[in-house]
Structures are given as structure tokens and as C-alpha cells.
Image (cartoon, coloured by chain):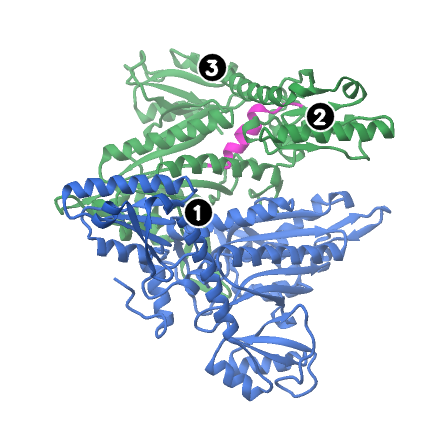
Chain colours: A green, B blue
Amino acid sequence: MPLKHPKAKEFAEWYIELVEKAELMDYSPIQGCMTIRPRAYGIWEKYQDIINARMKSDSVQNAYFPMFIPESFLKKEAEHFEGFAPEVAWVTHGGNEELAEKLALRPTSETIMYHMFAKWIQSHRDLPLKVNQWCNVIRWDTKTLKPFLRTREFLWQEGHTAHSTEKEAEEMVLRALSWYREACEQYLAIPVMLGKKSKGETFPGAKYTTTVETLMPDGKALQAGTSHLLGQSFAKMFNVTFKDQNEKDQFAWQTSWGTSTRLLGAMFMLHSDDKGLVLPPKVAPLHVVIVPIAKKDDESAMALQAAERVKKSLEEQGLHVHIDNRKERTPGYKFNDWELKGVPLRMEIGFKELSERSVTVARRDTGEKDVIPEDKLALKTVAILDAIQKNLLEKARQFMNANTAPAKNFGQLKKTLEDMRGFVVSGWCGDPRCEQAIKEDTGATIRLIPFNDEPSGVCVMCDRDSKHTAYFARAY
Amino acid sequence: MPLKHPKAKEFAEWYIELVEKAELMDYSPIQGCMTIRPRAYGIWEKYQDIINARMKSDSVQNAYFPMFIPESFLKKEAEHFEGFAPEVAWVTHGGNEELAEKLALRPTSETIMYHMFAKWIQSHRDLPLKVNQWCNVIRWDTKTLKPFLRTREFLWQEGHTAHSTEKEAEEMVLRALSWYREACEQYLAIPVMLGKKSKGETFPGAKYTTTVETLMPDGKALQAGTSHLLGQSFAKMFNVTFKDQNEKDQFAWQTSWGTSTRLLGAMFMLHSDDKGLVLPPKVAPLHVVIVPIAKKDDESAMALQAAERVKKSLEEQGLHVHIDNRKERTPGYKFNDWELKGVPLRMEIGFKELSERSVTVARRDTGEKDVIPEDKLALKTVAILDAIQKNLLEKARQFMNANTAPAKNFGQLKKTLEDMRGFVVSGWCGDPRCEQAIKEDTGATIRLIPFNDEPSGVCVMCDRDSKHTAYFARAY
């Protein structure tokens, strides 16, 4: 039952086969939309817990804003409208009546939220205002659609804040980014690089955009989350003002930041293999599956009894454990099935284990098997799960490092992109025309400019002195 | 700062003033849509925890299905389409392109979910399948709109299950209903009555609908949640079949059940008073606010210190506590403000309390004040919160009982509806024409028929022998 398409050779087909067969998603009759099946949605719930904990400790409050946005709102911030209009889905009829003004389904909620912020903020005492919503958003994308990574409807969280100073807003931008880094690296085992976007890749309407970027196994970069300093541009359009301590009217400084269900796709793509899904234990809905193996009836009862005993001792460690006691399936079928579905550890209890009072433990990530005495099993299991978590991050980080290389000139950049793929690090003069020319020729965009940016020789495109170090890559 | 409109005399205006001033909601530029502000959304998150715990212990899994539904899907089940079509919002354009088939925004998700169920269910071993989603739904309602109780977009959970036997499906219907009863009564302090709907009030496409109903202070009934036995009608339309143990194809037996953010509105409406919001402690985001009161600077430091000490001891009991130390506000302003916002307990610490090492505790529900020695405060506080929780439910239950009365004939029914409002209990022959005639004349509908239904004298409308006991009321 391993997947038909090998990851190394038929990456795109492998990914589609993976997310379907591991029951992570299913298609919708509407092109570009998908169903998030329970096995994947359970991981999204864990991600929500991780981000909610961080937001709440920073006094960010969850709320819910309408999904309908009047066209006139979207148009208020010109850059913003230009950026999103081509991807907006429009509601024109309610019941049997045509609407007076057509309504956008939110592609993002800056405009509707800041219309409210303007009413809620009066004084500097009302600041900072920090609000987040978990919701669905719609972007009628015409690029190639891919489950989790690019769909027309997806789930996300969008945090929106207003502050009395630019400094405080900038700190918020970086704080949100640090939450994303932590969630990616410590939980999803996705290593990331942090930096700023070029003007060309900045969120429409923002002063600047910061990003967490990672690398997929096919060498394409993936934007895992972004955090924007909006400055005062939306505040000016939506009149988000406050009386400062001298009773003078001031415009608020704003930020917004978001991550979406595409993170799940990135995680599936990064760690999984030809046998199926591989999940980091910290977000796996199920940590351990126990397969009792018996040839005779009396063995069967004993194996099941041992399995129940083991399950209980593991649950005391806070682990989620399932006993697969299906009569109609062979052990081999079960092994394949749980490997496909990404359970981090499989435990086998058969005649040998029963006689030794031990358990055979198989790691999903490396395939390694170990026989562990039952009395040491609970603590050992916790340690192995921890090792799996670290191993997945480490492997992915090594891959990202190994596929990040400098290029001194355009020929080198192009060749490196073709040979190795991954990130190519080069000098850039800062001219958007050079950025554009590289994109047109190679398909690569500037994924980020590191926070400790400095010039790096000449511009890889035009040979003028560089002003920045830029990370180029093709991207999802 | 109490509300301008008294609850007893200007109920409708009082409710609107309440939800606005207590910062529970705000309007949207789109008529009939609203923003759920953090103070209300935090309660919705608690409700999600309550229902999620019950669902998960019953192996119901959360998932997410597309919000776009093709018109052809909605049309498959004729009754279902007829029931929902007048309220559907339609998407006709994506980006700048007109869509080939217009898309409905889900008013409910039976059709899109069961299209998937048909793919996921093959064998009796795949049953029961139990899936729930938390999401937004759209009903382009033309009835009178009211914050939380009736809006064109709202949040809900919809559980959908498939079973191999009708008996198992019927048990599921009642189990979901029992979760709703528990959540309403034990957490939201909303007393409910359980029963079945008449055919005229049944969910479009269902075999029967069960309901939890409650009564609002203005005497109108409110449907707090419903749970439907769908039978096999959707299964037949969407081909949800399974091979039974004899390898014979069978149609699945299905259920669906839902509750929404209208529950929050019911809770606000039921318990609150002329001072503002009253919340049951079990779902209040904040349990206690401490107001340090001091006339001199040295008192102020001591009062704050005592407040911090009290806060810590209460937090050790798992309570959420806030110290209101705003310099620019008087104690009187703060008292009003927290009463408006519905914090169940206020604690005052001033000179008297400091000298006695005690705390003055004021109950939001009854206004009672008590001076409690600091060393007994933590346990006493838990007990008082418990008493508030019980008191709110009890008061509401007494109100519902006092406003539920029998009527033997139509004149009596009409008069009772006008005098007392509330539920009128009468015999009903079962003829939809009688049901319709009563509705047209009085505005009252059959809210429920109790599970232990039996004939009750003659039909209140036609004087023929009754077949049922029906609870009539005007409703939200």
C-alpha cells in the first residue's frame, strides 16, 4: 500500500496522492475548493491552541467580523484594492433580489475591521487595541491550485492591532512573527528564515511586510506567514484616530499578520515519504498505535490484555493511543495503513513480546525498530517522540541549508536555480526593474531580505553596487 | 450609567441598548450582519469547549467543508431546496469573470457534506460516521433582524452523522439534544423544554425534528437548538450507501443537529437587567473585578497591595480576576462600568476593609453585599459564584413555569397568549390546517410536542378529538 508515485521523482503527483490517501482532504465540486477532513482539521485545532496561547498572553482578543465587504470599502485604500480586486468573489443576489451594492467575500479583513476600529478607539487609553479572528477567506485565484497550498477558500487567523506609536507597532509586527517562527519550528518542525519583503512583494497598502519563509523538498520556497507594518495608511482612509495625552487628534499606527491552513500542506509535504504521512509528534492527533499480533485465540486475548495495559501506562504520560484490533485485517495491512496515516510510533505485541513482557516499537520517521521492556516503555516512549520531533526539524533544516547558496552573477544565479533549486543569495541594487527582470527570466522572486541586511557585492542583475542581500527562489 | 430603556417597559429597545453598550456586538455596513466583539466572542469560545468536549467523547470529529454549494446540489432534495432557496445568497462572479454556475453560500451543509459522505462510506465498518463543523452560515433573511437572534450571517456548529440502522440514528438525535440541554441549563443557565416539532416546523428534508425551546422575558419562545432525524431521504438523493454484513447495499440513516451564536443573544436577554449585562459565572470570561478605593496616597498603595494578594488567592481557585486601578475614574464610575459589562462579582477594598483585613463583595445578580474576612475569601467566592449560577437558572425556570399555562379552547388560548404570553398548552388534532389557522390568527406556532405526547381533550381550534398535546407560543 505505499504510494504509487515516488516523492523523489514525481513530487507533484506524490503530494496529491499523499493528501488524498492519508485522508487529509477531499475535493469539492467547486474547482479550487476543498474539504479539510478530520485527520487534517484536528491538526489545525492544535495549531489554533498554539497561536491562541501566545496571543492571549499578549492580550490579543478573538472576535468575529462580517465576511461581506462593500465594494466601496475595498476601494478606499487604492493600493489595497488594486492588489485584491482581481481575486475577489462577488455576491450579487440575496434570495431572489438583486443587491443594491455588490458585496465582496473577504479576501482579508483590514477594511471592515478598521471601519469598526474607528468607532471603538477614542482615546490613547483605548490603545493598544489587539484583535484576531479565525475564519474562512476567499481569493478567486487563477494560479495553479493545490490542496492546502493554494485554494480559493481557506482558513486562517488574521491579527489586527492599533497602537499609539510607530515603535510599539513595529514591536508588535516582530512579536507576531516570533510566534509564527515558534509555531513552525517547535511544533510543525518547519525550519524558517525571517526577513523583510521587497516593495514588490509587500502586502498591498502596507509600509513593509515581514515574513517567515521555508523550503519545500522540490526546492520551491513557501511563505509560511507574514506580519505587516501598515503604518498610518489605513488609519487615514478609515479615520482611525485617538486623542493623545495632550488631547490632540492622532492617527493610529497599525499592524496585521496572518497564517493559514497552507501551513498544514507545508508540513505534510516536508516530512512525508513514499509510505505516506509523517507527522511531528507535538501536533499528531494520535501518538501511538498498538497492533496486537496473535496466531491463536488464547494468545489473542493475552496480546489484547497487554495492549490495554500499555495503552493505560502511555495515557498516563498524556499520550494519545489507539489499539488496532480489527479482526478482518492482517498485521501487515495494519502496519501499512498506520504508516500511510502518519502515526509517529507503532507498537507490536506478539508471542515473543508477551513471553518477554516487552514491546516492539517502530519509529515512523526512520523506520528503526527497538524492543523495549514494558516497565521502561512509558518514559522511553516520551523520549523517542521527542527525538522524532527534533529529527524532523533537523533534517528539514539541513535540507534548507544545503539548498541555500550564493551567486555572484546572473549566470550563476540561473544555473544554481536550475541545478539545486532552493534559495539563491545575491546582491541586489534595490531597483524593482532588476527584480522584475530576474522574475521574468527565471521565475524566481525575492523571498526575503534578512533583517541584518547589508550590501553584498554588485547587483546580480545589473552589476551596479548592491544595496541589499536578497534571497531569491521560485515559490509556491 | 444604567441603561436608558427599562427592561420591563421597553424590552426591544433595552435589548439593543444592552448589546451595544456592554460591547457585545457592533453593526456592520451590511444590513443584517454584525460584528461579534471580543466580550461576546470569548463566551462563544467557551461554548465551543463545552460542546467539543461532549462531541469528542462521542467520537464526533471536527472538519471543514466548502462554503460554496452548487445550485444543482441544493436542488437535489426538493423539500430542502424549497425550504432554503428564498434565503440563499448567490455568488455570480469570481474576479472579473462571470461564473458558469452560480454558487450558493451555505445556509446549512447537508448537501455538500453528504456528497462527500457518499465517497467516504463503503462498508458497514465505516459507520457510524460522525462529523461536525464550526463555521459561518448565510441566510438572507427578510424577517425582522435582531443582533445575535436573527442575522444574515451567523456562526454555528452543525453535526452530521450516518448510521447503519434507524435506531442508532434516533439515539444520536437524542444524544445531541441532551448535549444542548446540558450546555443550556448547566452553563448558560437557560432552562429548556424538549420535544418534537410538528410537520410544519420540521427541518426541510427531515423525517422529524427535535428541539430545545426556551422562553424570553418578553414572553416569546426561542428555539435554542435542533436535532433532526433525516432518515434516508438525503442518503437516497446523494447515494450514501454501504455494504452491510451480508454484502448487500443499504442506504445510510442520517442525522443533523445544530446550535448557533443566537444562544448568546438568548442568554444576554434572559439574565440581564437595567444596569446591564448579567452573565452566568461558568461562561463569564472574567469572574471577579477588584476595585481598590483610597482617599490618600499611602492608602492607595496598601489597597493595591491587598488587591494583588486577593487576586492571587482567587486565581489559585482557577478564577479570572481583574484589578481596576484606573486613576482617572471614580469608584462609582467603575462600579457602573463593571455592572454594565456583567462581571459576576465585584470586590471593594478601602480603608475599612484594609483595617479589618476583609473584602466587601457585591453580587451582580442580586446586588447583595457582604463583608468577608480575607482568609475565608477564596473558598467563599467559589461558593458565591456557584450560588449565582444556580440562581440565574432557577429564576429563569420559575419564569418559564409561571408563563406556561393550559388552554381548553381557542378563546382561552388567544386570551392567554395576550395576557400572559409564554407557552400555551392545548390539545391539537394533528391537522396542519388548524395549526395554520392558529398561526394566522394569533402569530403563535407549535413550538414543541412533548416526547411523552398524548391526547389532551379536544383540539383547541376545531373541537375534534385531539391527538397531541402541543405547546403554542409566539417565537423569535
Q: Which residue is outermost to the front?
A: B356
Q: How many marks?
A: 3
The part of the chain drawn in magenta is A260-274
Quarter location, residue B14:
bottom left
Q: Is residue A10 visible?
A: yes
Residue A405, percent across and down? 44, 13
Q: Amino acid at mark 2?
A: Pro
Q: Earlier in the sequence, mark 1 or mark 2?
A: 2
Could you give the CA–CA distance between mark 1 and mark 3, rounded to whole angstroms?
37 Å
Instruction: Return the chain for callout 2.
Output: A
Tell me residue B310's x, y (percent): 33, 42
According to the picture, the residue beneath numbered tag 3 turns out to be A401
Tag 3 secondary structure: helix
| Crowd around label 2: few <14 · some 14–19 · many ≥20 (10 Å) | some
Q: Which badge, 1 or 3, comes first in the chain's sequence?
A: 1
Q: Main secondary structure of the magenta part?
A: helix
How dense is the environment of label 3, judged by Cα within 10 Å: few (below 14), some, or many (20 and up)?
A: some
Any mark on residue A2, and which?
2
| Viewer-proximal residue among A432 and A26 | A26
- Amino acid type at circle 3 is Asn
Q: CA distance from mark 1 to mark 2?
A: 40 Å
Q: Is residue B139 above or below residue A109?
A: below
Q: Is residue A93 above or below residue B462?
A: above
Judge from the rendering whether residue A459 lies leftward or rightward of residue A44; answer left or right.
Answer: left
Q: Quadrant of the N terminus of chain B?
A: bottom left
Between the residue at mark 2 and the residue at mark 3, the CA separation in whole angstroms equals: 29 Å
* Depth order, front residue of B249/B157: B157
Q: Please state if A167 lies on the left or on the right of A360 as rendered.
A: left
- For mark 1, what is the residue? A88
As helix, strand or loop, the secondary structure at mark 2 comes to loop
- Of the residues shown, which amino acid type is indicated by label 1? Val
Identify the residue at image location x=35%, y=31%: A175
